[in-house]
Image (cartoon, rainbow, N blue to C red):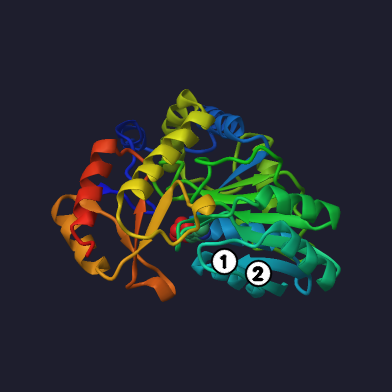
């Protein structure tokens, strides 16, 4: 089976080889050297401080929320799909007071709408948004502009980039980004990764396993406060060699080309408007979702169905990981058999 999924993705052979070993004891010189190397490689991908915490993408988002939002604080949160809704759920569970900008699926609110909302709400402490809405294959390409809004109103920008980083990295410094190992970092699940440019601002206690201050303290010694996801870190070591060997810009181009191939050749309508189409997870409307998924499986390909409201009316095809243009050709051919 080959996984053309939103994640976990098809991981390259060198990553599989790297994880298939006895985990070292983490309080040793040997493991500290591996951890340091991986943190340095993560820093080479993007300029802010990388933090690794055991967990998946949901944990990364919760860590971001719990360390940067205090109960009772006002947060402007944008949602245009399932993961935007989950981000809001996290903020509300922390006791944040959410002012929601609910936007059309496949689209994203322009920065002036966000700025208007922030100004009208007043005393906003955070703006929260999903970078790549995985449920609809939509990339919000206004986020660097939202950062300007956040900075000028004294708010922190919180970005869920679980299904995009590092396939499309920001040029600008973004306050806080939450991501994970199993998607465009082409590794197994198990490492929540945060990129932070701003000090954590929790005034109310955060559970120890999610407390960024503790992770930042340990990072000074190239350690984690508790057991890290050791084998996932071996995987990340190899995956980052691949990504950095190619270069982050070329890595982005590769995803763009793969995704464009699908957008140009699949005879179905993408959910996202053209300029916001995702280059990691493509999503199309179809009334034959089940048939397409079943037929692809017979040919050795796993893709995903829809989520939430779009469950039975869409398919999602991921283009991350160890796949080839030949795989994409076969997938296109099979999907197009189900276009009336
Ligand atoms: C945008 C986004 N946020 C959060 C998550 C949650 O990640 P996980 O399933 O690793 O907990 C996902 C997973 O698909 C995602 O795509």
Give me the disc on residue 263.
none
- Residue 32 image offset from top left, x and y in percent: 55, 31
Q: What residue is shown with label 1?
A: 84
What residue appears at the point 20 percent right and 49 percent down from the top-left corner?
A: 333
Q: Nearer the viewer, residue 235 or 137?
A: 137
Q: Quadrant of residue 101?
A: bottom right
- Residue 227 image offset from top left, x and y in percent: 52, 47
**How many C-alpha atoms fall within 10 Å of the one at disc 1: few (<14), some, or many (≥20)?**
many
| Residue 155 falls left or right of residue 63 | right
Q: What residue is shown with label 2?
A: 91
Quadrant of image for the C terminus: bottom left
- Residue 289 image offset from top left, x and y in percent: 27, 67
| Residue 191 falls left or right of residue 320 | right
- Separation of marks 2 and 1 at Cα, in angstroms: 11 Å
- Residue 189 image offset from top left, x and y in percent: 42, 50
Residue 327 shows in this picture: yes
**How many C-alpha atoms fall within 10 Å of the one at disc 2: few (<14), some, or many (≥20)?**
many
What residue appears at the point 53 percent right and 53 percent down from the top-left corner?
A: 276
Assign a secondary structure to mark 2: helix
What residue appears at the point 42 percent right and 76 percent down from the top-left corner?
A: 309
In the image, farthest residue toward the top = 245
- 210 relative to 99, above or below: above
């Amino acid at each position: 089976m080959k996984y053309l999924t939103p994640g976990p993705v098809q991981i390259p052979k060198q990553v599989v080889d790297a994880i298939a070993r006895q985990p070292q004891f983490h309080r040793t010189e040997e493991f500290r050297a591996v951890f340091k190397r991986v943190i340095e490689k993560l820093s080479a991908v993007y300029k802010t401080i990388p933090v690794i915490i055991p967990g998946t993408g949901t944990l990364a988002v919760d860590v971001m929320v719990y360390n940067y939002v205090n109960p009772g604080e006002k947060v402007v949160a944008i949602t245009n799909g399932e993961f935007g809704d989950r981000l809001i759920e996290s903020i509300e569970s922390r006791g944040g007071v959410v002012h929601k900008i609910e936007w059309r699926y496949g689209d994203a609110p322009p920065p002036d709408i966000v700025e208007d909302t922030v100004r009208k709400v007043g005393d906003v402490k955070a703006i929260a948004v999903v970078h790549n809405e995985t449920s609809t294959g939509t990339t919000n390409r206004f986020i660097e502009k939202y950062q300007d809004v956040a900075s000028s109103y004294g708010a922190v920008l919180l970005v869920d980039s679980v299904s995009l980083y590092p396939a499309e990295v920001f040029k600008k410094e973004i306050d806080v980004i939450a991501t994970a190992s199993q998607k465009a970092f082409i590794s197994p699940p198990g490492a929540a990764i945060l990129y932070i440019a701003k000090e954590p601002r929790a005034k109310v206690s955060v559970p120890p396993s999610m407390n960024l201050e503790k992770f930042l303290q340990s990072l000074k010694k190239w350690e984690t406060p508790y057991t890290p996801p050791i084998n996932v870190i071996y995987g990340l070591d190899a995956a980052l060699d691949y990504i950095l060997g190619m270069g982050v810009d070329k890595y982005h181009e590769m995803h763009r080309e793969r995704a464009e191939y699908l957008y140009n050749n699949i005879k179905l309508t993408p959910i996202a408007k053209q300029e916001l189409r995702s280059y990691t997870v493509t999503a199309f409307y179809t009334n034959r979702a089940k048939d397409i998924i079943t037929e692809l499986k017979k040919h050795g390909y796993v893709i995903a169905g829809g989520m939430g409201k779009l469950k039975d009316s869409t398919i999602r095809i991921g283009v991350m990981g160890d796949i080839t243009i030949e795989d994409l050709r076969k997938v296109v051919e099979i999907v197009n058999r189900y276009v009336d």
